Image: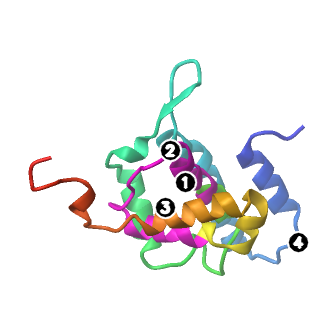
Amino acid sequence: TVFESGAILTYLYTTADTGDDKKRMASILSWIAWANASLDPICFLETPEGKVYDTGLKKPSKRIDTLDAILSGKEFLVDGGFSTADVAVASYLLYVPQFFRGIDLSRWPNLVRYMKDCASREAYGQAFGSQVQNYLVQSLDAMKPGDDSKKKRFGVF
């Protein structure tokens, strides 16, 4: 039995005939592992009982700063286009605005652009439905860096 998203994605990727060279394969597998080991606990803060109570993306994060910097020079995580690495990473990221409505991720503009690009894919809409897809795209569109109008009124509130 294969369970856990990272194991499932690794299985699907390594058994598919992708034609990827060893360097691309290693990069994709690294991102899948990173998503499960490092990104999940940032996106979803849990009680000791395993219940999600908040997201760590409400606060600054060096790991997300690094991811944002990596995404500044590329459309997707691995050279050669959308891959299983993006499925792993974007799936965690795209759940955050669904579960924590109104979250502002604008401090990471490249991350927001990446999330929107992933959510805008036709396959994403087919998998999650147009309602979820439209909500995410609209929410991500609204996250503009440096827009303090939502944060302060008259410089006081």
Task: Tell me the residue at 65%/79% (across/down).
Answer: 81
Mark positioned earlier in the residue sequence (4 or 2) = 4
Give yes or no for residue 16 being in the magenta stretch.
no
Residue depicted at x 41% and y 50%: 103
Measure the C-alpha gap from mark 2 to mark 3. Answer: 17 Å
Q: Dot 4: what SS?
A: loop
Of the residues shown, which amino acid type is indicated by label 3?
Ser
Which residue position is annotated with label 2?
43
Residue receiving disc 4: 17
The answer to which of 37 and 5 lies nearer the viewer is 5
Q: Residue at x 44, y 79 (%)?
A: 73
Badge 1 crowding class, 10 Å Cα cut-off, few under 14, some 14 to 19, many 20 or more, is: many
Would you call the spot at circle 2 few (<14 residues within 10 Å), some (14-19), or many (20 or more)?
many
Going from the N terminus, do you reach mark 2 or mark 3 first?
2
Residue 65 location in percent, x, y? 36, 59
Q: Main secondary structure of the magenta part?
A: helix
Q: CA distance from mark 3 to mark 1?
A: 13 Å
Mark toward the viewer: 2 or 3: 3
Q: CA distance from mark 4 to mark 3?
A: 36 Å
Are the two marked residues, 2 and 1, in contact with CB atoms closer than 8 angstroms?
A: yes
Distance, label 4 to label 2, CA atoms, is 31 Å
Q: CA distance from mark 2 to mark 1?
A: 7 Å
- Residue 131 in the image, given as x and y percentages of width and height: 67, 59
Q: Residue 125 vs residue 114: left or right?
A: right
Counting residues from the N terminus, which is met first, the one under dot 3 or under dot 1? Answer: 1
Q: Secondary structure at mark 1?
A: helix
> Is residue 116 shown above or below 30?
below
Q: Which residue is mark 3?
A: 139
- The span shown in magenta is 90-117
Marks 3 and 1 in Cβ contact (< 8 Å): no
